[in-house]
Amino acid sequence: ATPISLVVASGRLAKRGIVVKEAGALERLAQLNMLILDKTGTLTEGKPKISRIHAPTGSKQGLLRLAAAVEANSTHPLAIAIRAEAVQAGLVPPTAADYSYMTGKGVEANVEQRKIGVGNASFVAARNWTFGSPTIRSFAEECQKLGETVLYIADNNRVIGAMSFFDTVKPLSKSAVSRLRKEGVTVLLATGDHPAPALSAAQTAGIPHERVYANMLPEDKLELVDQLKKQDYKVGMAGDGWNDAPALAAADVGLAMGDGTDAALTAGHITLLQPRMTAIPEALLISRMTVRNVR
Ligand code: ADP
Ligand code: MG
């Protein structure tokens, strides 16, 4: 494309809240045939809410209070949901100390002379937690069948309860995915979440199960981008989290959701000011018209 047509296209995109940070990104976008989507905050609203709390040996409020204490400083959407629910229940969580985070898995801290942990099934395995009651596992299975995300809460390495979260798929995600497919782009889902909520969100958005990658750490998302590039795909990555930043930077085109973290915004080549999924096919179509016009 000529420099002038790229400037015109950038203007058309800007009106739609799509900011192209470098001209080369528009030309690479026109070639796109593979797109990896992050789940939380990209395909979904990214504002999970607590659905159910299971506290077989104590009170639900007591469990929520401990979880909110451990999640006091985390910016993760699940941590925000826990704190919001605690506030709503009128709870004042105790102060925690000595936080230790494990990327894509969970967090632990000292609360009232005990070590309290909040994390997913990988965290349970990594920390060798035992289960206080057999009903916790069946609670988790039930929630996962509904496509909910589950976190376990442990007291001194013994799981004492669990909570589940639901996050809704953005209403236009499905239509965005189908428009991308019509343009010849294969759409994949990659998430740090458990397979059950990943598959459920994918199904709602019309992404087939064989194109879903769950339990993906930031370095796994990066590895996926690199693998696909080696297979000569023109790879796009859309995400909002700091955990997406390495993959956004490595992709041929990194599309960062505008309400995302600074790390994602810095790493991406294109910023979607409003975090609309349909902005992706719009940007693709405009880039293709621009590049085609001058050939
Ligand atoms: P995504 O790729 O969908 O944006 P993340 O990589 O942000 O997901 O998180 C993956 C998983 O790691 C979460 O679903 C959750 O189970 C766990 N996790 C991450 N941070 C925390 C936290 N602060 N507290 C509890 N669990 C966490
Ligand atoms: Mg995300």
Image (cartoon, helix red, strand yellow):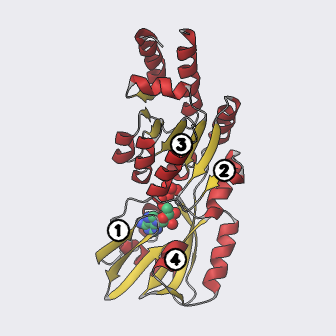
Q: Earlier in the sequence, mark 3 or mark 4?
A: 4
Relative to 180, 5 lies left or right: left
* Residue 256 location (% of width, % of height): 44, 40
Q: Which residue is mark 3?
A: 230
Q: Are marks 3 and 4 in contact (CB under 8 Å)?
A: no
Q: Residues within 10 Å of mark 4 (few under 14, many from 20)?
A: many
Residue drawn at x 43%, y 32% is 270
Q: Quadrant of the C terminus?
A: top right
- Most foreground residue, 252 or 200: 252
Q: What is the spatial separation of the Cα atoms under label 2 and label 3, in whole angstroms?
A: 18 Å
Between marks 3 and 4 in the image, the one whose residue lies nearer the viewer: 3
Q: Residues within 10 Å of mark 1 (few under 14, many from 20)?
A: some
Disc 4 residue type (three-letter): Tyr
- The image quadrant of residue 155 is bottom left
Mark 1 sits near ligand 1, with its Cβ under 8 Å away = no
Q: Are marks 3 and 1 in contact (CB under 8 Å)?
A: no
Q: Which residue is mark 2?
A: 211
Mark 4 sits near ligand 1, with its Cβ under 8 Å away = no
Q: Residues within 10 Å of mark 3 (few under 14, many from 20)?
A: few
**Numbered circle sitting on residue 72:** 1
Q: Would residue 122 be visible to someone looking at this image?
A: yes
Q: What is the spatial separation of the Cα atoms under label 2 and label 4, in whole angstroms?
A: 27 Å
Q: Earlier in the sequence, mark 1 or mark 4?
A: 1
Disc 3 residue type (three-letter): Lys
Q: What is the spatial separation of the Cα atoms under label 1 and label 4, in whole angstroms?
A: 16 Å
Q: Residues within 10 Å of mark 2 (few under 14, many from 20)?
A: some
**Numbered circle sitting on residue 152:** 4
Disc 1 residue type (three-letter): Ala
